Amino acid sequence: MVSEEVEMAIEIAKEGMDQALEHLNNELVKIRTGKASPVMLTGLLVEYYGSPTPLNQVANVGTSDSRTITIQPWEKGMLGPIEHAIFAANLGFTPMNDGEMIRINIPPLTEERRRDLVKHAKHLGEESKISLRSSRHKAMDTIKKAVKDGYPEDAGKRKEDHVDKMVHDYTEKIDEMVSIREKDIMTV
């Protein structure tokens, strides 16, 4: 019974660490690098017949070149609401509406802005590491409680070492993800 609690705690910690990694990946993708990407508009909600709807459900979002995002709504009446949603989201873009589609020109990033984005990426990495430590802490508490309740001490130590190794492996993955994104941001 106690060993099942320990295994469950480790599994929950692993799921928490996986979620932290997935969340970091989703946040890093949103950081713009000076190149146009439809992903930059992920999560943008447009007012569609009275309800907020994801942009990709009311329009085709693509890129015409490395600096231009194109948005082709399926209904011409959606041009205004899409344009309004882009302004309201305060993404730092100015949409251009030509009556058929919306174009967004992505300006090249300044060196200072690149450094700020790298700092932001590193901050996101640190937040993910905090999440890892939180998951580790919960698993360790469960293991220590199990040892007090009669779980073998040497087995508890092995489980603690296993959790520590998991945290170390996930920390390395986070550092690698942030490093790759940092290189991408700093590449002109």
Image: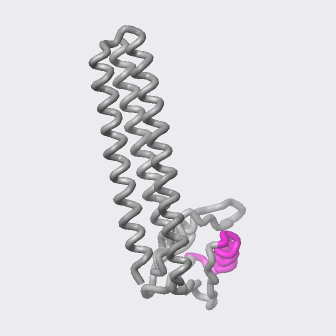
Percent position (x, y) of residue 46?
A: 64, 67
Query: What residue is rendered at 33% in x and 52% in y?
Result: 172
Q: Residue furthest top?
A: 150
Closer to the camera in the image, 30 or 128: 128
Percent position (x, y) of residue 58?
A: 57, 70
Residue 86 in magenta?
Answer: yes
Percent position (x, y) of residue 86?
A: 64, 74
- 64 over 6 or under it: above or below: below
Would you identify the image quadrant in which residue 6 lies?
top left
Residue 105 in magenta?
Answer: no
- 13 over 173 or under it: above or below: above
Left or right of residue 149: residue 166: left
Would you identify the image quadrant in which residue 14 lies?
top left
Query: What residue is rendered at 46% in x and 32% in y?
Result: 137
Percent position (x, y) of residue 77?
A: 66, 78
User: Mostly what secondary structure, the magenta segment?
Assistant: helix
Q: How is the image coloured?
A: one colour
Closer to the camera in the image, 114 or 24: 114
Look at the image and tell me in which quarter the C terminus lies. bottom left
How many numbered discs?
0
- 28 over 106 or under it: above or below: above
Query: What residue is rendered at 61% in x and 80% in y?
Result: 93
- The magenta segment is 74-90
Query: What residue is rendered at 50% in x and 45% in y?
Result: 130
Left or right of residue 54: residue 83: right
Look at the image and tell me in which quarter the N terminus lies. top left
Closer to the camera in the image, 109 or 93: 109
- 31 over 188 or under it: above or below: above
